[in-house]
Image (tube, rainbow, N blue to C red):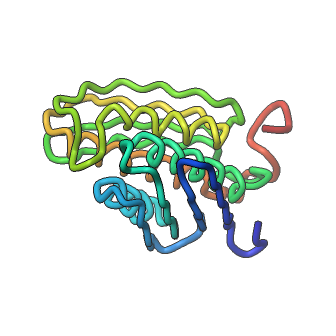
Amino acid sequence: MSETKRTAQVSRRTSETDITCVLSLDGEGKGDVSTGIGFLDHMLRSFAKHGFFDLTLSCKGDLEVDCHHTIEDVGIVLGTAIAEAVGDKKGIRRFGESILPMDEALILCAVDLSGRPVLGFDAAFHTERVGTYDTQMVREFFYAVSYSAGMNLHLRELAGENDHHIIEGMYKAFARALDMAVSKDPRIKDVLSTKGSL
């Protein structure tokens, strides 16, 4: 991790996917993403833009099978990069939340960088896929992120009809909540925990 900018570079190669990722938590919202799944690329660019993260990510996956391995493994790599970029968590707010409207959809997201991986997820999708992104994979993506990052992550659809809006709202709300959680607070001198560690 850089002293001036909190960055991480993560690579992961299996028989199913080959992924490289560079993440800066102290960025400008630049997203350079290529996964072979257009809607996933759009979501990750939105994540970067609305979290003020700089994200460069490429994935070559077995899309001839389906989108599952690519989306899940990208979540694993992104979660790993978040954990590495955050580092020792000294001085950060630790908690973050967002209630985000996306047209008729309304999404709640709450994050705790506790080191304890938990996903709470509540959404009802109306179609099987958006583009070539299976809607069943939305939960799998955020599960992979939360467990790889050691993050308590709650996502809830409060309202919504259009799956594109619901999913995009989730990525944007997650970005804003994570941006808040990783932000530095000058009042926090060490780690924000009565235990003294996270």
The N terminus sits in image quarter: bottom right
The percent coordinates of residue 89 (x first, y second) are 75, 50
The C terminus sits in image quarter: top right
The percent coordinates of residue 62 (x first, y second) are 44, 50
Point 44% across, 46% down: residue: 71
In this rendering, the answer to whether 108 lies above or below 102 is: above
Point 59% across, 41% down: residue: 95
The percent coordinates of residue 167 (x first, y second) are 29, 42
- Camera-nearest residue between 40 and 53: 40
- Residue 129, quarter of picture: top left
- Camera-nearest residue between 183 and 171: 171
- Residue 195, quarter of picture: top right
* Total tally of numbered discs in the picture: 0
Residue at the far right: name it. 196
Point 45% across, 34% down: residue: 140
The percent coordinates of residue 18 (x first, y second) are 57, 58
Horizontal side of 45 relative to 145 (left or right) equals left
In this rendering, the answer to whether 103 lies above or below 20 is: above
Point 80% across, 31% down: residue: 194
In this rendering, the answer to whether 176 lies above or below 111 is: below
- Residue 115, quarter of picture: top right
In this rendering, the answer to whether 44 lies above or below 15 is: below
